[in-house]
Image: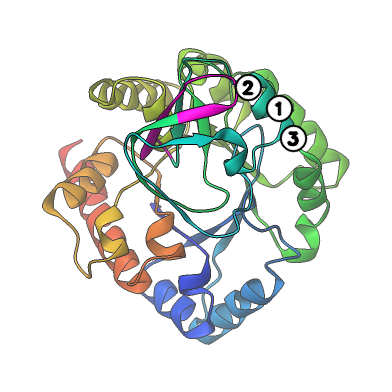
Amino acid sequence: MLEIFGTIGPACSDRDTLAAMITEGMTGIRLNCSHAGLQESREMLMHLRQAEAETGKKVDLMIDLQGPETRIGVLKEPLFLSRGEIIPAEMLCLSDAVSAALMPEDRILLDDGKILAEMTDENHMQIIRGGMLQSRKSIKIEGRTIDTPILTEQDLRNISLIREYGVTSVMQPFVHSGSDLRRVRSVLKEHGCGDVRLFAKIETEEGASDIASIIPECDTVVIARGDLGNCMPLWKLPAVQKEISHACLQQNRPFMVVTQMLTSMIDSPVPTRAEVSDIFNAAVDGASSVMVTNETAVGKYPAEVIHYLSMTACEGFHYRKKCL
């Protein structure tokens, strides 16, 4: 069965919208715990349960843990960063670990690389590629990783609430090796959640290179093209996606494809031809699941997004079966 995942957020937090998404084919929904944990999302999740009751269909509730991902802090208001502008790094409300890691001439990728900056000294950065920056967006130092724990205190709190909130899957970000997943499995078992599915997000070159050790330790591999695309020239990303897909198929391990699958639909009621081709080809390549993020969490047309995602992925799934 091909799984269709949306992401819950402000744009789809009411019962009616969630019910429409389920009706359009959504089989699972992701809660991004980097923005809000289970307790903070109680009302949205209550609406999800109401939508399930209304449609008569249960969906997989997945929590995407914070993990070792680095993000900027909570801004007083969104920042518009102009090309050539020099700003103090402290304006981004960075954690101590990120601030300590910054060095002159570092290239800084913000919000999955939409914004690019370069450190002019230890405390200031110049904007090379500008844009609007919102709170809690990702930050990455190009070519380097910042050493942070695989599970944060917030992750441990969310894991302790898995049974209470009916979570059925956990997504672990920035998996570098199989040992990372063994640590997560151990914590899940400690909390009586050993049966919860574990999804491993491949978002770094290290993870892509060590995919052979990762595959046996997870239930599903996630080809997370956002941060993975920050680790390499973008024109190399499709080949890496194919290599991970092939490795999963060889070991009979399900894999998910995610990131910017229908990004134009954040503002448009219909997708681009390139986007539907991307979804179709992911299914033809053997993906067991596909997922959208901002498209449903903050976009204008969450139900329409699920409609196009589901219909296109199913076309690809059936085409693959016909051709095998």
> In terms of sequence position, does the residue under pointer 2 or pointer 3 come before the other?
2
> In terms of sequence position, does the residue under pointer 1 or pointer 2 come before the other?
1
Q: In this view, does 279 lie to the left or right of 7?
A: left
State which region is magenta. 112-125
Q: Which of marks 1 and 2 is in front?
A: 1
Q: What element carries label 1?
A: helix
Q: How crowded is mark 2: few (under 14 residues within 10 Å), some or many (20 or more)?
A: some
Q: Is residue 31 above or below residue 72?
A: below
> In terms of sequence position, does the residue under pointer 3 or pointer 1 come before the other?
1
The reply to whether callout 2 and callout 3 are in contact (CB within 8 Å) is: no
* Circle 3 residue: 151
Where residue 134 sits in the image (x, y, percent)? 49, 53
Marks 3 and 1 sit apart, C-alpha to C-alpha, by 15 Å
Given the image, on which type of amino acid does mark 2 rest? Ile
Where residue 165 sits in the image (x, y, percent)? 74, 65
Residue 30 has which mark?
A: none
The colouring scheme, among rainbow, by chain, secondary structure or one colour, is rainbow
Given the image, on which type of amino acid does mark 1 rest? Ala
Q: Residues within 10 Å of mark 1 (few under 14, many from 20)?
A: few
Given the image, on which type of amino acid does mark 3 rest? Leu
Quadrant in which residue 112 is drawn: top left
* Circle 1 residue: 97
* Circle 2 residue: 146
Q: Nearer the viewer, residue 250 or 157?
A: 157
Marks 1 and 2 sit apart, C-alpha to C-alpha, by 7 Å
Q: Can residue 252 be seen in this view?
A: no
Q: Is residue 274 above or below residue 78?
A: above
Q: How crowded is mark 3: few (under 14 residues within 10 Å), some or many (20 or more)?
A: some
The residue that appears at 67% across and 67% down in the rendered structure is: 41
